[in-house]
Image (cartoon, coloured by chain):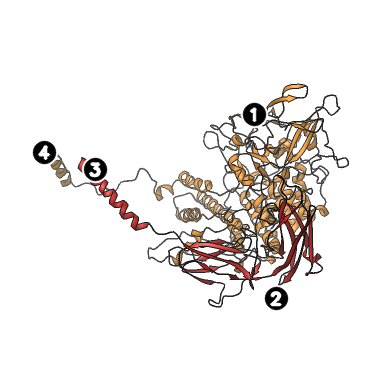
Amino acid sequence: MKKLCLILLVVTAALGCNKMQDDWLDKKPTDVLLNDQVWSDPKLVFSVLADLYDRIPDYQQLEQFANFADFDEAFASSYGDYHRHQNQTYDYTSGNYWDYGYIRDINLFIQKCRLADKLDSTDRNRFLAEAQFLRANVYFELVKRMGGVPLILDTMHYNYSGDPTYLQHPRNKESEIYDFVISELDSTLNFLPKDAGTKSRATWGAALAMKSRAALYAGSIARYGATTPTVSLPGDVVGIPAGKAESYYRIALDAAQELINSHIYSLYLKNPDDLQKNFSQLFTDKSGNPEVIFAKDYLIRSRTTQFTVQNQPHSITEEGSWSGFLNPSLNLAQSFEKLDNTFAPFAVKDPATGDDIPYDDPQDIFSGRDARLGGTVILPGTQFRDQNLDIWAGYVLANGSIVTGSTFGQKKDLPGKPNVQVVGFDGPIDQLEHGTQTGFYIRKFLDPSTGAGQIGTGSEVWWVRYRYGEVLLNAAEAAFELGQKDQAAVYMNQVRARAGLNVPLKAADITFDRVVHERKVELAFEGHELYDMKRWRLAHKVWNGASSDLTTLPGKADAPSTRIFGLWPYKIYDPGHPDNGKWVFKKVMPSAVTNAHRFRLGNYYSRIPDDVMGNNPKLIQNPNQ
Amino acid sequence: MRKKSGYITGLCFLLLIGACKKDNYDPPGSKFTGALVYKGDSVRVSYGDVTFQLWQSGWGKLTPINVNVAQDGSFSALLFDGDYKLIIPQGQGPFLQELNPDTHSDTIPVHLSGNQRMDIEVLPYYMIRDPSFTAAGSKVTAVFKIEKTVTDNRAKDVEYAELYVSKTQFVDTRTSIATARVGGGDIADMDHVSLNVDVPARTPAQSYVFARVGLKIAGVEDMIFTPVTRISLE
């Protein structure tokens, strides 16, 4: 021991005597990349940017699909999610967003990118434009949830003086945030690629599509905000003066027209013979898709979603009991209009006699409707993944009584016919999770490829954030609001023709209700519903808290739709009767729906969290809470 | 070794004893109760919809204590003794607030030591007076007067009056099983308004219901109500 110590001492002394190189202790870290390393290599810069893309906030999305059941588009068939249909009110904090850490990281990126002289100038300009696109996007996401927010465009640093007041900024006007989003997107247009093949990075088209949507939101808040005068704060921190509506609608129309007239995008129409299939393929076909403008992309063996795993029909699930989470509502399904451009609930009962109408085929009740119905919703009697589905709720006997089961495909005795299957392997069965409880499954974004329904594989179907169809509807709405109804009809008819609605609407047919309805059916399950209902100030009318019945006027914009309804198909069992084996339908309300949705005026702008308010006394809370 | 574990046990024991003194204190014990009133009459609202805030400074970050107002206009909160500032946020309730004479603002100072009852005087746009409910068969009828209490330039119109019938004591649009409405423009005589509605069958069977009338004021979210009345039906 003593000897070892001595040796060590001598060696240390010997080393100490030697004059070492000056940078002996100046090591390059092996676990982090330094600024000048990152900012000299475009691939590393891109990886920083990829993180910023990944942090784009979405409220409803393929990875947060349960939120689709928060309103009236779908029922959540899962014990743990019934609460979505049982709450009496939406919390004031629900849907709030306050992520200035993300904004700071974007600002930091922009600041460093401007100084990165080792990068090629084309690369640098594109990176900068992409970061600005992301910054416009995050402020747009903020303003539509929270109203006017502090507009922070540089990275703030604390000077450790003990006094943080110089870091506290008041909220900007709501219109100032929208103006910033629009001008920021304008400044990126020259530097983003004009390339319809790029979908998951910012492009010229994505910037214009976002600009038209943002300006449209601002315009409608200015116009329809007048109907809810109490949803405002002093200094226009929340609320936009009505006089600004015209100019915002003009910007929205111009931006949409610039994109439309460039002809680099078009409506997806690879399958003109089967428009239902065509509409569902629009979301799942990732090769040369001419319609998708900007998407969050996924890749097998890298990053996938469980959307298909959890939402595939129960009878053909690839993953045990995982299936059938989202069940589109009858409220949504009956909104798809008939091919003669009229609205009607599904013909369940004969209005003259009050009897159930028998149908030869379960699909017959849905025939003669907008092709988007079958493209968005899996209907009884149809297929998924080329396999027939088994959606039926039971037998109706001659005396009107019903024989049904409580497990998928259960067998029971029928009069004179023992041990037969009395309910479909896909449901609907009330209060049984993972199968449909409304009679419908979701088709939009559901991946038909083999293996997509397995937990370990998942689906690589992308989440479409912006697409050409929406841009056409933006143009139609802006044109309508500017009084150019003939223009509005031209744009809206393109979207409708792709859905098989071949009788064009005339200028006189375009009304506010039409505009609202067209977005509802075209953009269902794409994350638009909440923000559309908010900007039109319709949310508190449609989700008014009253336990009202399903509306019989599906084309009326402000018809209440507070509870989810379903439509269950039954087979007639009455041997000897001509209707034996035919189908009848019953309108039902899943018994897990116990309360009506109530959207209060204080929900129009989500509550700023109390800790944020406590940190910054210059902030004022959103109104009516 | 044994000696060591003895020391550790002793130390732990000391720490436990010490900790008791350090961070154990009595729970809040002072009850702050009261009601929203207009000249002595309770201002009745819908449950869970009207709140006010209590602020107490001097404890680091400021976050409000939210106090809910019940259906009959009453409230109660269990608090620590001290000085609070009571604020009814903008847009809460079917009423206006008079400026507080002490603070010359909407802030009401509350000094709490021991249980305390304090009514908050507010100025509702309307009051519903003399409601009476009668039942005949399955029909419930309500007769009431509407008194306009704000008549200056802050006055607002009646949007509608509604009669709600509910199976439980919580009665408003959320729980109503039968609702009758009269629009503000259709009310001919404010001193005699009548509403009636047929009550559907209740499952499970229930021989009584609860009813009350609510008044919606144009441009104001929260409604003002009559007391909840229990009605027997045959």
**Whether marks 2 and 3 lie on the same chain:** yes
Q: Which residue is nearer to you in this view: A62 or B46?
A: B46
Residue flagged by tag 3: what amino acid is it? Ser
Task: Mark 2 vs mark 4: give the one in front.
Answer: 2
- Mark found first going from the N terminus, 4 or 1: 4
Task: Mark 4 vs mark 3: give the one in front.
Answer: 3
Q: What is the letter of the red chain?
A: B
> Which residue is denoted by mark 3 in the rendering?
B5
Between the C-alphas of marks 1 and 2, the distance is 66 Å
Instruction: Indicate the secondary structure of the residue bearing disc 1.
Output: helix
Between the C-alphas of marks 4 and 3, the distance is 34 Å
Considering the image in quadrants, where does the N terminus of chain B appear?
top left
Between the C-alphas of marks 1 and 3, the distance is 63 Å
> Which residue is denoted by mark 4 in the rendering?
A2
Numbered label attached to residue A316:
1
Instruction: Indicate the secondary structure of the residue bearing disc 4.
Output: helix
Q: Which residue is nearer to you in this view: A493 or B110?
A: B110
Q: Residues within 10 Å of mark 2 (few under 14, many from 20)?
A: few
Vertical side of B41 occupied by B195: above or below: above
Instruction: Indicate the secondary structure of the residue bearing disc 3.
Output: helix
Q: Residues within 10 Å of mark 3 (few under 14, many from 20)?
A: few
Residue flagged by tag 4: what amino acid is it? Lys
Q: Is residue A149 visible?
A: no
Residue A26 percent location from the top left of the image:
29, 48
